[in-house]
Image (cartoon, helix red, strand yellow):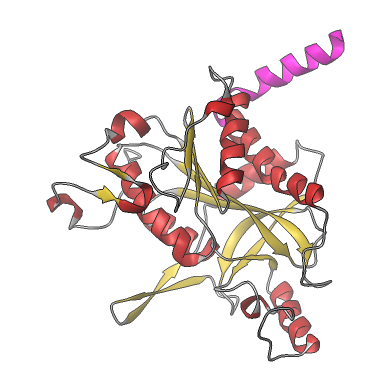
Amino acid sequence: LLSNGLVHVKNPHLDSMDEDVLYHLNLGTKTHNLPVMFGDVKFVCVGGSPNRMKTFAQLMHKELGLEGDGKDLKDICAGTDRYSMYKAGPVLSISHGMGIPSISIMLHELIKLLHHAKCRDVTIIRIGTSGGLGIDPGTVVITDIAVDSFFKARFEQVILDNIVVRSTELDKDLVEELLNCSKEIHDFPALIGHTMCTYDFYEGQGRLDGALCSFSNEKKLEYLKRAYDAGVRNIEMESTVFAAICGLCGLKAAVVCVALLNRLEGDQIKAPHEVLVEYQRRPQHLISLFIKKRLGLYNQMELLDNAFFLNN
């Protein structure tokens, strides 16, 4: 990160543009006053589903004690249905859809937005769902390294007709800070592990239940066990490009995903809807605690809660 904490876009062409249209967010430098709208953002949380990111913004609105009703939060990207964006004080909550291309497009425009808005010292966290590997469903995995399908800590971006390899390392101090936060929540298990990022949900994750499958159950389990032995504890479809782009632009980044199932025991997600809803709240709960602690609101809240509990 630059010493002044600003987000740095690594693109010499941007300075010569008189206007920057952030097309997929339905925002722009001439149509919107980005520093006024977003200049106070310190935490950006991203996740696949628009509804989940709205729920998270409403949670943060309530937890930060902001004025007004969190139910009235407006989708800042309402002019497009590609992504949804909500703001609760210094917290920006954005959906990114499924898969590397979808999150990649959003990140380019989000990082330019943070740059144009002159945001400083921003922490960005992906809160998502994943398939667990040798861990119980409902476990929250804090990613130390995002790896590809060959268990290598790299992201391969095709640029023109070259393959450019980028590092997928995440901020180690942030990983430890998140693990420490998780120890204060006794409702669910959390652990640190590698996260494998794939280009597909079915064949690309060794599933036997897609429209296509050319391998046996034995081959699948042999592959998943090798992934486990390489340190992989969960599988999703965004972490490598997320780590690569955020790292290059000087953003402190983390990935925190709940496991919806243990892939060593099956491929289909069969847990009841209400169980899955509760699982998906777990990363949100952890990140809301992390943000409150960072903002110095946590001990105060805890004392108030305890006082309330003791007096009633």
Q: Nearer the viewer, residue 246 or 192?
A: 246
User: Is 301 covered by the magenta stretch?
Assistant: yes
Residue that appears at 27% across and 36% down: 32
User: From where the camera sits, is residue 61 visible?
Assistant: yes
Q: Main secondary structure of the magenta part?
A: helix
Which percent across, then down, holds residue 77?
A: 41, 42
Q: Nearer the viewer, residue 153 or 301?
A: 301
Name the quadrant containing residue 33: top left
Name the quadrant containing residue 78: top left
Looking at the image, which residue sits at the far top?
A: 311
**Is residue 245 shown above or below 190?**
below
**Is residue 171 shown above or below 196?**
above
Is residue 160 toward the left or the right of residue 170 in the image? left
User: Is 302 covered by the magenta stretch?
Assistant: yes
Is residue 95 toward the left or the right of residue 286 in the image? left
Residue that appears at 28% across and 77% down: 160
Residue that appears at 71% across and 90% down: 215
Which percent across, then down, holds residue 69?
A: 57, 21
User: From where the camera sits, is residue 293 visible?
Assistant: no
Q: Give the residues in magenta.
A: 294-312
Quarter that holds the C terminus? top right
Which percent across, then down, holds residue 190?
A: 75, 50
**Is residue 64 shown above or below 125?**
above
